[in-house]
Structures are given as C-alpha cells and as structure tokens.
Amino acid sequence: MVTLDTLRKASLFEGLTDDQLTRIAEMAREETLEPGKVVFKENDDAEDFYAVLEGRVAILIDIGGGRQTMVDTVTKGETFGWSSMVAPHTLTATAKAVERTRAIVLPGRELRDFCMTDCHMCYIIMEYLARTISIRLKDTRLQLISLMHG
C-alpha cells in the first residue's frame, strides 16, 4: 500500500480527502521504471494509470514508417496512462522511461469503479485528466507542425 503522503506528491490527488486517499492507497502500488523501459505501447489495451514521483517518462506517438516522435515528457507530480480512465481504454501513445523513475501505479478498472461510488472525487480526477489531455493535444499539434515545417 502506498502512503497518503506519497499520494499527495501527485497533483492528480490535490483536493481529495484523507478518506478518499486512503481508498486509493489501498489499490495503489509503487513501481520503479529503469531507463529505456517501455511502460506501454500505443494501441495496446490501457490497464494502469501512473503518477510520477521522481524521474522522467517520454510520451511518444507513431508517425508512420516505423518512426516515433516525442510529444511530451512527464515529470514529478504529473501523470500518464490516462486512457485507462477513458473509454475505449486504448492507449493513444507509447510511454518510455527516460531516466530511473518512481511511479504510483493505479489499476484503471479499480479506480474507475471507485469513481462510480464517489462523484466528488471522480469530478476532481476527471477535471485533472481533461486538462492533461488538452495539454497533450496542444503539444502533439505543435510537434506535428514542427515535423511538417522543420
């Protein structure tokens, strides 16, 4: 079980009560990702949701011809694997550890089920995810424009 203090290091959990954090801590585990570790691949089924405690993870998208481009880097306090929370639960990018990374790992299905029982918590989490998705979309657009005109 991950401690409440550890959960509070992730911006995703800002505004949640101790009771809500306790329930999340019960389903969470901590994982260390070594540099170069592919955490998941684009188009695979999304199972887990991650919050970075320390380190750095690259978010990559396929651009054709067996090539990928980095559209974002996730660092301390930020999250990745949001597809585990949003249907159809298919990963929209590849995540790869750039350096040794400690992360909180949450099973998406279990977190979604908990969200169904707590509307306040669900709103906080989904609002955070909407901001994250919006930022990633903007970053991806900028990367693609750069590739086309670079």
Image (tube, rainbow, N blue to C red):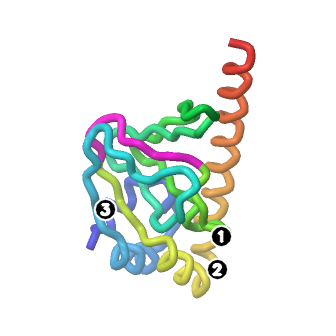
Check disc 2 and give the amino acid type.
Cys
Q: According to the image, label 3 marks what residue?
A: 5
- Left or right side of 144 for 101: left
Q: CA distance from mark 3 to mark 2?
A: 23 Å
Residue at left 26%, top 73%? 1
Secondary structure at badge 3 equals helix
Q: Is residue 14 visible?
A: yes
Earlier in the chain: of badge 1 and badge 3, it is: 3
Instruction: Name, please, the residue furthest toward the front.
Output: 65
Per the image, the residue denoted by label 2 is 119
Residue kind at label 3, given as amino acid type? Asp
Residues shaded magenta: 93-101
Badge 2: few (under 14), some or many (20 or more) residues near its Cα, within 10 Å?
Answer: few
Q: Is residue 100 magenta?
A: yes
Q: Is residue 23 above or below residue 136?
A: below
How dense is the environment of label 3, judged by Cα within 10 Å: few (below 14), some, or many (20 and up)? few
Task: Tell me whether the residue at label 1 lies in contact with that at label 2, contact meaning CB atoms closer than 8 angstroms.
Answer: yes
Mark 1 sits on what residue?
Answer: 123
Instruction: Give the x, y percent position of residue 144.
Output: 70, 28
Q: Which residue is pictured at 34% across the width and 54% down the height?
A: 103
**Residue 118 at x, y = what percent?**
59, 83
